[in-house]
């Protein structure tokens, strides 16, 4: 049993150990009862729970990590209530305390409990059943949630009774989980026809609260801007609390982890978002953007970029808007001043490489690229370390791809490359490119 993780709502964000082949991996859903009780408890206003959660059915919550895995296996396996779960919450002052908590770590125990109940029954009544039979029972008994995909919810929402009935009806007991293939490829998940550069237009019509649309496209090392425009934003007929809004997320090509250029931006009208190699910005009727400089200032990475537009789960009515996604690419690449190529293995490091800096250099752009970047499966991570006039610079020692360091008015430059994470079993080919700009 494993939590899917809290890196959603972008696809391909289920991380270890949830990505394990035999794990029953659990996503997080909001339940009408839990959610409405919490809102009324928080605001002390009777009936406000309904206004903030109008659906009579569970909803997959935004932070719940999504599938598939990088090699195309379905995750999560199933979903369960993981929002505003009233649970034991011991503290020093209140060792037997209770508190509301949220996360896929809160939804996973519900499925663990269901499996424990099934196992208790099976040990006595169906002793020939196996752990794989339990997994199949959980998925067969799950209730499908309309408006969400398998990547969002797995087989559906947990129902322990249906799962037990499915095990009783199982005609092939003693099953064993299928083994992983010896190798695989990155699962193609793009759903709009943009490759490196292009434009895509769409209309979002009557999107229900707590539901989303996702646009996935492929960018390369030549892609230099990604722009999202929302126009003709319609916030619905009924908006009693004035909280109806879209939420926008833009995730980089990273997988299985948090890597959002734009995270949970509330959009109340026309708005634009612009991702470049050096900064992510936004304009228009936008509030509540969460970011950190590791992602907002990160370069555009090769691979699948995901744009998610969700009707905020606290909205009262369905929303509509028109969107345009515009992706541009560099047409002219300036000639580099220095190019060095090589290969490196896991935990290896090159010697410090001294590079002569031309007199009068105003700026140095140092970039490290490699073969198994975020566009590939499996993915390698190399780190770039720089020593210059002002000492050591670690801006290239991140999980970004490519790694990039920009120096102002350097006169001295040493560079080292470290093989931080290389999972291919072979040495990783890399290219170090440096531009000196006067």
Image: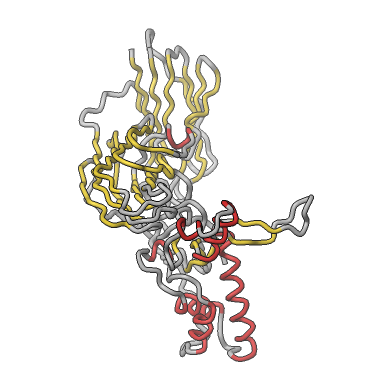
Judged from this view, the residue extending furthest toward the top is 360
Q: Is residue 283 left or right of residue 194?
A: right
Which of the two residues, 56 or 256, is positioned nearer the viewer here?
A: 56
Q: Indicate the position of residue 112 as horizontal and vertical percent values.
A: 60, 71
Point 53% across, 83% down: residue = 164
Point 35% across, 34% down: residue = 282
Is residue 280 in view? yes
Q: Is residue 95 left or right of residue 48?
A: right
Residue 339 picture quarter: top left
Placement of 410 over or under 100, stated as above or below: above
Placement of 8 over or under 269, stated as above or below: below
Point 45% across, 12% down: residue = 411
Which of the two residues, 70 or 89, is positioned nearer the viewer here?
A: 89
Q: Quadrant of the N terminus?
A: bottom right
Which of the two residues, 114 or 236, is positioned nearer the viewer here?
A: 236
Placement of 86 over or under 249, stated as above or below: below
Q: Indicate the position of residue 422 as horizontal and vertical percent values.
A: 48, 46
Is residue 372 in view? no
Q: Indicate the position of residue 131 as horizontal and vertical percent values.
A: 56, 77
What is the total number of numbered labels drawn onto the structure image? Answer: 0
Which of the two residues, 110 or 265, is positioned nearer the viewer here?
A: 265
Q: Indicate the position of residue 223 as horizontal and vertical percent values.
A: 28, 37
Residue 296 picture quarter: top left
* Colouring rule applied to residues: secondary structure
Q: Quadrant of the C terminus?
A: top left
């Amino acid at each position: 049993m494993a939590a899917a993780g809290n890196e959603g709502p972008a696809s391909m964000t289920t991380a270890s150990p949830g990505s394990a082949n035999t794990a029953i991996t659990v996503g997080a859903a909001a339940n009408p009862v839990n959610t409405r009780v919490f809102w009324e408890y928080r605001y002390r206003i009777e009936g406000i729970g309904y206004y903030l959660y109008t659906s009579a059915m569970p909803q997959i919550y935004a932070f719940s990590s999504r599938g598939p895995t990088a090699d195309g296996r379905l995750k999560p396996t199933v979903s369960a209530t993981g929002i505003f779960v009233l649970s034991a919450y011991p503290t020093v002052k209140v060792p037997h305390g209770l508190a509301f908590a949220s996360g896929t770590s809160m939804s996973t125990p519900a499925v663990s409990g269901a499996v424990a109940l099934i196992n208790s029954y099976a040990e006595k009544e169906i002793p020939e059943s196996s752990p794989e039979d339990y997994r199949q029972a959980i998925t067969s008994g799950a209730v499908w949630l309309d408006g969400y995909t398998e990547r969002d919810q797995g087989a559906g929402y947990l129902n322990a009774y249906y799962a037990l009935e499915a095990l009783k009806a199982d005609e092939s007991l003693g099953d064993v989980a299928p083994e992983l293939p010896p190798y695989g490829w990155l699962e193609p998940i793009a759903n709009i026809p943009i490759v490196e550069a292009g434009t895509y237009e769409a209309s979002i019509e009557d999107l229900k609260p707590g539901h989303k649309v996702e646009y996935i496209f492929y960018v390369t090392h030549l892609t230099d801007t990604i722009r999202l425009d929302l126009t003709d934003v319609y916030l619905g007929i009924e908006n009693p609390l004035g909280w109806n809004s879209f939420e926008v997320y833009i995730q980089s090509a990273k997988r299985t982890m948090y890597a959002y250029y734009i995270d949970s931006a509330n959009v109340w009208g026309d708005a634009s978002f612009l991702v470049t190699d050096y900064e992510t910005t936004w304009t228009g009727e936008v509030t509540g953007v969460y970011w950190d400089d590791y992602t907002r200032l990160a370069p555009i990475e090769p691979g699948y970029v995901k744009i998610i537009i969700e009707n905020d789960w606290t909205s009262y009515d369905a929303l509509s808007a028109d969107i345009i996604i515009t992706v541009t690419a560099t047409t002219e690449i300036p000639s580099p001043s220095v190019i060095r190529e090589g290969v490196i293995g896991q935990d290896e490091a090159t010697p410090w490489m001294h590079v002569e800096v031309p007199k009068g250099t105003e700026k140095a752009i140092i970039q490290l690229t490699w073969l198994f970047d975020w566009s590939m499966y499996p993915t390698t991570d190399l780190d770039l370390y720089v020593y210059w006039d002002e000492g050591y610079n670690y801006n290239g020692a991140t999980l970004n791809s490519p790694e990039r360091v920009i120096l102002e008015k350097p006169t001295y430059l040493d560079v080292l490359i470290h093989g931080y994470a290389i999972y291919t079993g072979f040495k990783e080919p890399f290219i170090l490119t440096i531009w000196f700009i006067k």
